[in-house]
Image (cartoon, rainbow, N blue to C red):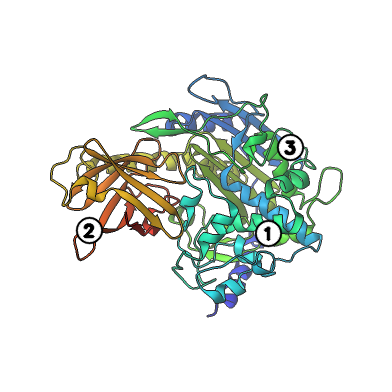
Amino acid sequence: MNYTKKLFLTGAFFLHALTASSSYSAELGEQQIDALVKRAQNELNVPGIALAVIKGDHVIHAKGYGIQSIADNKPVKSDTLFQIGSISKSFLTAALAILVDDKKIAWDDKVIDYLPQFQMYDPWVTREFTIRDLLTHRSGLPLGAGDLLQWPDAKSSPDEIIAALRHLKPQSSFRSRYAYNNLMYGVAEEVIRAVTGMPWDRFVEKEILIPLNMTGCVAHSARITTTSERATPHMVVDEKLQTTFFKEGDLINCHIEGMAKWAKLHLSKGQLSNGEALISPQRQHEMWQPVTLQPVSYMAKTYSQTHFQAYGLGWRLMDFHGHMHVSHGGAVQGMASHMAFLPELDVAVIALTNQWSRAAQGLTATILESYITEKPTDYIDLYIDGKNRYKARQKSQKPATEPTTTQITTPTLALEDYAGSYHDTWYGEVSIKKQADQLHIKFSRSDALEGTLLHLHGNRFIAKWNDRTLNADAYVNFEMDFEGKVKTIKMKAVNRSTDFSYNFHDLLLKKRSQ
């Protein structure tokens, strides 16, 4: 069965599932929501949460919980700013939808018509790549390809990101399978610049945030005012909560009041409160249509009665107990958020948190399910159980998987022979220096990716990053040429729990001649 036919049949099933079901309105009350949030905070170690529930054009719950930072214990309020991570993709897609409405672009326009410098590894893919392809994670590249250009705090210009794409090798055929990719949204940002003459963040502020009166919300951290209160990111290290660094730049920072306005816009099919259309109903409908099929997760299949999952234009789509479910999550260092809709029931839930956990997603799922059934699944309990089982498994495997902090054996070469400057075609430079009796590694684009190389055996080391909030220690294998000199480095994350955006495994670092 070809891809187009399979997608059509899936969409037909999707629509049948939506129309065949009935709803049960037994939504959680304020005290129940408060109790659920408090348990998520306590059991998942989340210092601060902001949560909103929207029904139709009414915000029926918008509240802050806990603290902005363990450093000062300031309370989270309804106007506390959070970084929303990849929920920003929905704003970017809406900005493009506005340009489609204005007939300045079309979803299936070729990218090279706006960005002639755009080039993928395969010339045919370069010629065929459309704006729709940029938004739907079907590029053929592997999961998270190129993310180290932006992650965790890396700084790369749009031109550098576009230049890197031609060196990233595909893992599958173009448009044949789903693999989440952030760089393509960076290219989509540049399409907006090419068409409007404005950076995407300025365009989003002018065309979306201001018309929605999302006062205080910004699309670049440099424009956060000194009077704004901002939630601090946190990570758990050795079961202890720690503050960590902000990822600065052109990321949307918003409070729960502003995000509630964003939800209301979509529930009203793109219409502002004054009756004007910010986005036409046709464009809003298009964004919530399945494009790229995804495998159904065990959690969704088991607890949400999900039969299919897909990605639309900046949104995730699935059936949820027989109802259409539209959502997107967001995560940056120390922050996690989730926004979800049941459009048939005219309801949305948003959860913003200042710790990297599953709390936000558990809150939105539990509250939304309360609109369908009298006894909703407690997804917070599921995530608490999952966290406890993961900790138990890690504890039992710790002696086998954690590297020792002492050098038991001697490296094959003298330490100075490993030192040098290494270059990867899509990433750039990584340096290794000998300091005293140790090797130190530093990634050129990131302040955070700097640490010590601990020897394991032979020519294998482990990069132990100075910033322990990263949870991203990596194996470093030095490979030799026939003369016994270091030729290349390959890397791989030590722990499976390391975020996919640490795509060390895609690097091939070649030693530069001295």
User: Up-down: is 472 above or below 257?
Assistant: below
Task: Determine which residue is flagged by label 1.
Answer: 191
- Camera-side mark, 2 or 3: 2
Nearer to me, 511 or 338:
511
**Few, some or many residues within 10 Å of mark 3 (<14, 14–19, 20+):** many
Hey, which quadrant is residue 366 in on the image?
top right
Q: Name the one closer to the observer, 1 or 123.
A: 123
Residue at label 3?
A: 214
Question: Do we see residue 273 in this rendering?
Answer: yes
Closer to the camera, 91 or 127? 127
Label 1 crowd bin: few (<14), some (14–19), many (20+), radius 10 Å: many
Q: CA distance from mark 2 to mark 3?
A: 58 Å
| Residue at horizontal 60 percent and vertical 32 percent from the top | 50
Q: Which residue is mark 2?
A: 485
User: Residue 243: percent from the left, percent from the top?
Assistant: 46, 29
| Front residue of this view, candidates 219 and 136 | 219
Q: Which mark is residue 497?
A: none
For marks 2 and 1 on the same chain, the one whose residue lies earlier in the sequence: 1
| Residue at 19% in and 63% down | 483
For numbered disc 2, what is the local secondary structure?
A: loop
Using the rendered view, name the quadrant where residue 226 is placed: top right
State if disc 1 and disc 2 touch (CB < 8 Å).
Answer: no
* Image position of 484 (left or right of 429): left
Going by the numbered disc 3, the residue's amino acid type is Met
**In x, y percent, where is residue 329?**
56, 47
User: Which is in the foreground here, disc 1 or disc 3?
Assistant: 1
Task: Please give left or right for residue 232 compared with residue 476 in the image.
Answer: right
**SS category of the residue bearing label 3:** loop
